[in-house]
Image (spheres, rainbow, N blue to C red):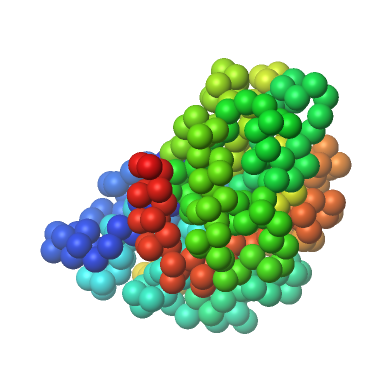
Amino acid sequence: MSDPMIGRRVLLRGAGGLAALAALPSLSACGTGTSRAASGSKGGGKTVIVRDSGGAFGEALQKAVYTPFTQETGISVQVTNLQGTQMLAQIKQGRPQFDLINNSMMEHAKFVTQDALEQLDRDRIKSLKSAKLPENQITDHSIASSFYAQCMAYRTDAFGGKKPQSWADFWDTKGFKGARSMCNPDADLPELEFALLADGVPMDKLYPLDVDRAFKVLTRLRSGIKKFWDSGPLPGVLLSRQEVTMSTVWQGRLADLLKQGVPVAAQLNGARRQFQGFGIAKGAAHMDAAYQLMDYSLSPDVQARLAETYPSNPASPVAYKKLTDEVRSTLAGAPQFYDKGFDADIDWWLKNESAVTKRWLEWARG
């Protein structure tokens, strides 16, 4: 997995997979996926095991968070990249071989329904006060540290100098010619919100989503969609090859394209935010160290350092003040962009994701 969003749709695939895993012997936390350990310890002898998604994001966490944490505290950080069903199996066996979980807030919410996360003692997370996180991203069992924005990307050389300004423009294949790409549910939540925004629904009136209306709007664009992307790099590939002129995309993915000189830009009007954060596994063996690493990770200084290392948006608004103008201007969480987007409604999606995904697959098959 190369970043926090890739594979989010396959983390929890139902009770059948969990039951099968639960019947297996306990999984080794450092034997599944990539294992990394922070170096430079003061020799304190303590350890914390954190689960993250690995790949480029995991490498950035290692550089910006884990290694400095070890250097400052002497607590060794070990890393595992276990999938959701594997983690749940260990927790249900009462032997989780990891302590702190870095995952999407939506997956944390799913873990809560399985009684798989510790209820947090906020008094042990001192950085909460200074980080000034959005209240809706602080729950009893998990706290957000960053987010990614799903938005529109377009080729700047495709429309004779015109710039698409809204999702209505994304749907306008006459005024903005060329093929489109949108995501497959294997990559992320179906993009119903974008369809409704294109049809004139105000951003603050999106939820509860009008599913029937959204699919009618999607059908209007169906013939113009060349491919449904199922991995983070694919929109960039399609745009680079000029196979499409517009695509939905995880905004952070555009950074590499811009470095390569590909003429692309993001339009952040109507971007959908999904937050990533931390929870502590039920029965974690290294509880105190898990709280210390969570507290450290949530501080504005550390969130800013991570943003300088990887195009991830800090959840803390304070962190943006610690970034250079150059870095801040590339992030969807910057003050000038934040209000242009909206938060995915986790509660709505938890109740409706399965039914919407099933309908989407039937719709896509035609």
**Residue 35 x %, y %:** 38, 44
Quadrant, the C terminus: top left
Front-most of residues 235 and 98? 235
Instruction: Locate residue 138: give its quadrant.
Output: bottom right
Quadrant, the N terminus: top left
Front-most of residues 101 and 366? 366
Q: How many numbered tags mark residues here? A: 0
Instruction: Locate residue 251: give its quadrant.
Output: top right
Front-most of residues 172 and 311? 172
**Residue 106 x %, y %:** 49, 64
Q: What residue do we see at 73% from left, 74% from top?
A: 129
Q: What residue do we see at 37% from left, 62% from top?
A: 354
Q: What residue do we see at 44% from left, 71% from top?
A: 351
**Residue 312 x %, y %:** 64, 47
Above or below, 202 relative to 188: below
Front-most of residues 266 and 81? 266
Q: What residue do we see at 55% from left, 33% from top?
A: 224
**Residue 124 x %, y %:** 59, 77
Above or below, 150 relative to 159: below
Above or below, 116 relative to 259: below
Instruction: Locate residue 262: give its quadrant.
Output: top right
**Residue 49 in view of the camera:** no
**Residue 39 as seen in the image, left or right of residue 365:** right
**Residue 247 as seen in the image, left or right of residue 112:** right
**Residue 31 in view of the camera:** yes
